[in-house]
Image: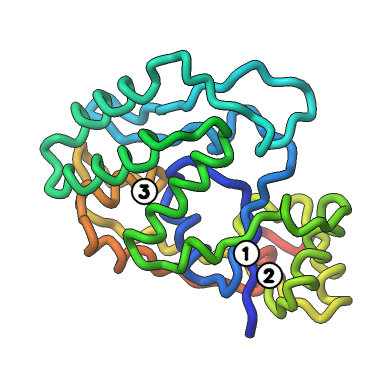
Amino acid sequence: MKKIVLMQPYFFPWIGLYEQIKLSSVYVHYDDVQFPKGSYVNRTRIKTKDGLKWITIPTKQLTLGMNINEVEVDNTKPWVKGHLEFLTQTYKRAPYFHEMIDLYERVVCSSHESLSDIAIASLKEVSRYYQLADPEAFLYSSKLEIGGKSTERVVSIVKHLEGALYITGHGARNYLEHERFEKENIQVEYMDYRRINYSQLYGEFNPYVSVLDLIANTGKEGMKYICSGTVNWRSFLQGEGGLR
């Protein structure tokens, strides 16, 4: 069964997104949709001794309705140096610190003018590190030339890719028209996140932090924690308190 995942490009996101990559037959960067301010597209959360902190990629001036792949990185600000210093201070005692910081440098020290390019580079580099999928085979919605909005466009993309199953994260539960997929003989399943504990620095385990934390603390062994499955959309919604 051909499994399609369609996700906005996020900057070193939490483990759950990499689990979607691992489960997919075809992974599509949804890069030509509106840039959502305050999202994980240009920032990620890091666990520190003082609690959760954000590292953020600065962007040039945004205009209303700008798509993710139109947003430019503001490289006049010393954000790369600041990130590397912060990550070094935070993870220097982690067992796989050097693997994590080397991987991070490969992404941020490359020449990236576009925000989507650097976010996608982070997804590719981690996918390569954990051998989740072939990152060079990832597709881009902006290059598929498929129009439409919301559910209509997602269905069209999945059909175009001859997908039989569409896998999505929990955020889609409030807007996805599930029956529209079924009319096209496409199954819809939501991620069934396991959020398995691994050894972290700084107290109680928190699964909702950047994958950089997993790399720094577990190295290549972290692959065994990227292991969630999926659940049919009806079962998922019933589990949240009834069908909607």
Report the amino acid beneath label 3.
Val
* Alpha carbon separation for disc pair 3 and 2: 24 Å
Q: Quadrant of residue 109?
A: top left
Q: Quadrant of residue 189?
A: bottom right
Quadrant assignment for the C terminus = bottom right
Q: Are marks 3 and 2 in contact (CB under 8 Å)?
A: no
Q: Residue at x 36, y 48 (%)?
A: 211
Report the front residue among 60 and 181.
60
Q: Are marks 3 and 1 in contact (CB under 8 Å)?
A: no
Left or right: 14 as drawn, with respect to 99: right
* Alpha carbon separation for disc pair 3 and 1: 19 Å
Mark with earlier residue (3, 2):
2
Mark 1 Cα-neighbour bin, 10 Å: few <14, some 14–19, many ≥20 = many
Q: Residue at x 58, y 40 (%)?
A: 116
**x then y, percent, for residue 59:** 56, 22
Mark 3 Cα-neighbour bin, 10 Å: few <14, some 14–19, many ≥20 = many
Residue holding disc 3: 211
Compared with 135, 63 (above or below) is above
Mark with earlier residue (1, 2):
1
Residue holding disc 1: 5
Report the front residue among 96 and 53.
96
* Alpha carbon separation for disc pair 1 and 2: 6 Å
Report the amino acid beneath label 1.
Val
Q: Are marks 1 and 2 in contact (CB under 8 Å)?
A: yes
Mark with earlier residue (3, 1):
1
Q: Residue at x 56, y 34 (%)?
A: 115
**x then y, percent, for residue 154:** 78, 60
Q: Which mark is residue 216?
A: none
Residue holding disc 2: 166
Looking at the image, the residue that sits furthest to the front is 111
**x then y, percent, for residue 89:** 19, 27
**x then y, percent, for residue 66:** 75, 30
